[in-house]
Amino acid sequence: MPVPKPERARALEGLRRFVDRVPLQVRPQLSYATREQGNVFTLVERRPDYRNPSTTVELEIAKLRYNVPQRTWTLLRTDRQSRWYTYEGFENREDVDDLIREIEADPYHRFFG
């Protein structure tokens, strides 16, 4: 089942605000984007490749997964081997903005090192 339109819109708006927080003059060196696949929204960091600055490297930072039957969101983080884990304490949340605020705060340095 697809993510309900209101929930999808809230998630995309919250992620757009996150992406837009990077100042325009910095964006050639660092930017963020969102990918959507089914019920998962992935936040991606983009930077020039240090070996070849004319190419861009993308790193998946976080995933927001919507559970359609429960109508809740879960935040996922990755490790150095690109394995995904549930971010403890942010399972089955009703408000997607809670997850986005946690990514921004990053109190345990799970998203931005």
Image (tube, rainbow, N blue to C red):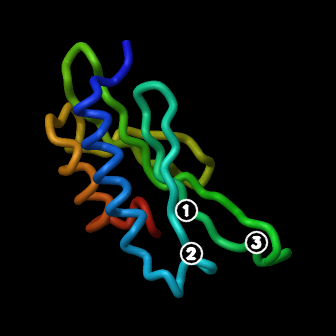
Q: Which residue is mark 3?
A: 49
**How far separated are the C-alphas under marks 2 and 1?**
7 Å
Q: Quick check: 29 above or below 86? A: below
Whether tag 2 and tag 1 are in contact, CB under 8 A, the answer is yes
The residue drawn where x is 43% and y is 76% is 22
Question: Quick one: quadrant of the N terminus?
Answer: top left
The residue drawn where x is 31% and y is 34% is 8
**How far separated are the C-alphas under marks 2 and 3?**
11 Å
Give SS at disc 1: strand
Q: Quick check: 74 above or below 4? A: below
Whether tag 3 and tag 1 are in contact, CB under 8 A, the answer is no
Looking at the rendered structure, the number of numbered marks drawn on it comes to 3
The residue drawn where x is 38% and y is 18% is 2
- Residue 60 position in % (x across, y down): 55, 52
- Residue 90 position in % (x across, y down): 23, 43
What amino acid is labelled 2 in the image? Leu
Q: Which residue is mark 1?
A: 45
- Residue 43 position in % (x across, y down): 47, 52
* Numbered tag placed on residue 30 in the rendering: 2
Q: Nearer the viewer, residue 31 or 105?
A: 31
- Residue 9 position in % (x across, y down): 29, 39
